[in-house]
Image (tube, helix red, strand yellow):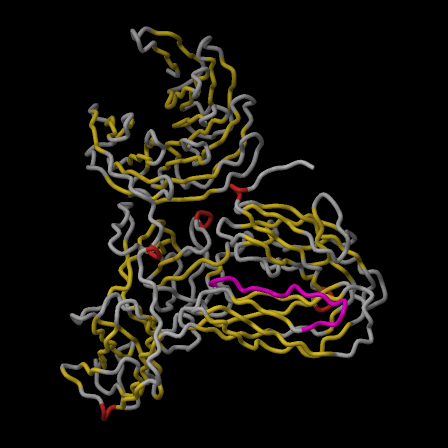
Amino acid sequence: YGQATLFKVADWTVAQEFVGHQDVLYAAQFSPDGKRIATAGYDRKILIWDSATGDIVQELHGHNGAIFDLAFSPDGKLLISACADETAKVWHVETGQRLDTLSQPEAEVNCVSFSKDGRWMLAGSADNRLRVWRLISKDEPAINPIVQTRFVDDSPITRMTLTPDGRGLVILSEAGNAKLLRTDDWSVVGAMEPLGETPSDLVVSADGSTARIALMDGRVVERPLPAIGTRDTGPGSCLLAPVYLDVGPLATSDESELVFTNGVADVSRGVEVNRKLTSKGEQDCFRFSARRGEAWVIEADATSGDLDPKVVILDEGGEPLLRTRLQAVRDTYFTFRGKNSGQVNDFRLFGWQEIGLNQFLYSNGEVTKTWQHPRGPDSGFDVYPGAGNRHTYFGTTHTTHALGEPAYVVRELGPGEDPEPNGLPVFEMFYENDDDPTRTAGESSRLDFMAPRDGRYTVCIRDTRGHFSGDFQYRLRIRPAAPSYSASIGKMNASVLPGTGRKIDLKIERKDGFRGPVSFQIGDLPPGWHSNFPVVIESDQHVAEGLVFVPEGIDHKTEPFDVEVVANAEILNRQVERHAGTIKGLTVGTSPSVIPMIQPIDRDVPENEDWTLVIPRGATVSARIVLRRGMNAKGEVNNGEIRFGGAGSGHNAAHGVYVDNIGLSGLLVLPGEDERELFITADPVAALGKRSFFLISANDGGVASFPITVDVQDATSLSVSAD
């Protein structure tokens, strides 16, 4: 009947009746100080009452469906509501203002909560998922960023509650499953004995040891809570550190020198084998010894015929050797169109807003890794390395993906780690491959191998399709891994226009598992010239962008000159230097038709002066594009549209830092205007620290602004000061 009744617990007499709703109620919550009560239900409105007088102090409207749950923040200032309209909303209790609508759920939202410290907002929904948002909208409307989506069960989430210490979250599902999650990483740490009936409510004991759960058949059952344990720091803390070795020149073996016993030939540690596959179903197997932690590379190249070699490593018992296990933590699928085996861009994925950067994506046996978010309404994820042919991980082979094909966000399980009981699959990955994961070797096979223990391991070679021929010849190398890299530069417009810069692309190709940073240095420039060197290609990345800048007033008669670019990295405690290339014919050109500048949002800095823009991780900040327009080729003032590009319009940004809110038209300044606001976002995974950043106008062959410094900082460490 839409009535809430307040009872005195001492004698169960009625203290107050709250009448104001027009239909059944589903939720009633006390504020932390007990002075307010919030109620909601089928009539789609939220009423906040004075618990002492029974007066309505706020009436909140905005939902388009039945409201199932309410939760006050720990300080009582905010209220979050769960609704059948597939949203949760955040409200300011005192003013009644709606501060945000959390619209990411894909089905009815059944339950909501704040974390004990008030930093996070939680919602469980009928799409079987828990979602977590970082609380930003504390006093004014703001977008609260989603930080986690967890598939918890194969049926809708109906109820949840935190343990008294806030370290655990008990979640109930419609199918009668009860699970405990750890709140520092939101992983499922244990499942309780199935309830056998749909649950309706629960409470956790004061000591956090048990949960009492009410069932729809009228029973109340008790379940002990699993141990929460400690946060998994990832397999890197458990896996072996690689052991790199030098065995000297590789031994060579041809067909006449190999002795096969039961189809296996023993070979040296470090060997090159040349042989043919001539029989149907044939595979050649070679056994070598390796010690625990040793890092090896297996290479198989076709040297004649239409052979497509595949490499498989067997353990001491002749079984495929397990490399690792991958736990699915979120399910998705390909939308809009499928993907070929080399494509790196436009991965359209269902529910992409809940997939982060640097996450592994498993589909049909292939594992890729997300590199850049969709940038605008008509785009998808880019995967590593961000350009060229895509890379794969855990030695998996490139494959095509169909429209609607299932995919999973996965994480690597540590040795001996139990999978989460979240209802999603666990994939076993074996040491096998029929393509180079980086595609630098074309269709040849490359497989990195780290011996899990001392033993004798067998490398088997066969044709991927099972074909055979008298001219199917291959070369197999079993060699120690030698981490390294090669460096190169792209083409550069050598005519640098006064007051602007020119971009130079810096590239590396990583070899044998080298993942560290690489620093590029440029040779001496004439007096007055400027560059953003040294420029660092970050760990695991493959490109960066250098800039050569000429201020106005530099002598136009400067003779063309060349300058060298050199790369340097530390690998295995050695400085490894590579000549990247030579920029030839640098000279000062004529005056540009536009000079772009990046300025702070609230003040002006002198031209050609570096300044620092601070961006907290997970936040978006503003700056300004300011133009000084010059004469175009017709001798007229350039009052036209000035374009700065689309998704890649921020140049030399750190991985995860990008120009945001570009829309379908990209970043541009309209005709006749000299200024516009610029939005820059730092993803939660963006590396902390400072990095040069610039923009490039499409005019005059691409003229760059003077670089500024973007400083990515940890949001939790920032403080506010007034001056």
Does the rendering let one see residue 202?
no
| Residue 149 located left or right of residue 460 | right
Q: Name the spot of residue 722 as percent of width and height, x first.
A: 67, 36
Q: Magenta stretch: dominant SS?
A: loop
Q: Name the spot of residue 179 as percent of width and height, x first.
A: 27, 38
Please tell me which residue lies in front, 537 or 249: 249
- Quadrant (top left/top right/bottom left/bottom right) for the N terminus: top left
Identify which residue is drawn at 21% across, 80% down.
281
Residue at the limit of the structure toward the left, as seen here: 262
| Residue range (magenta) | 524-540
- Residue 479 to residue 110: above or below: below
Does the rendering let one see residue 551?
yes
| Residue 452 located left or right of residue 242 | left
Please tell me which residue lies in front, 565 or 476: 565
Residue 525 is inside the magenta segment: yes
Residue at the limit of the structure toward the right, as seen here: 635
Figure quadrant of residue 335? bottom left
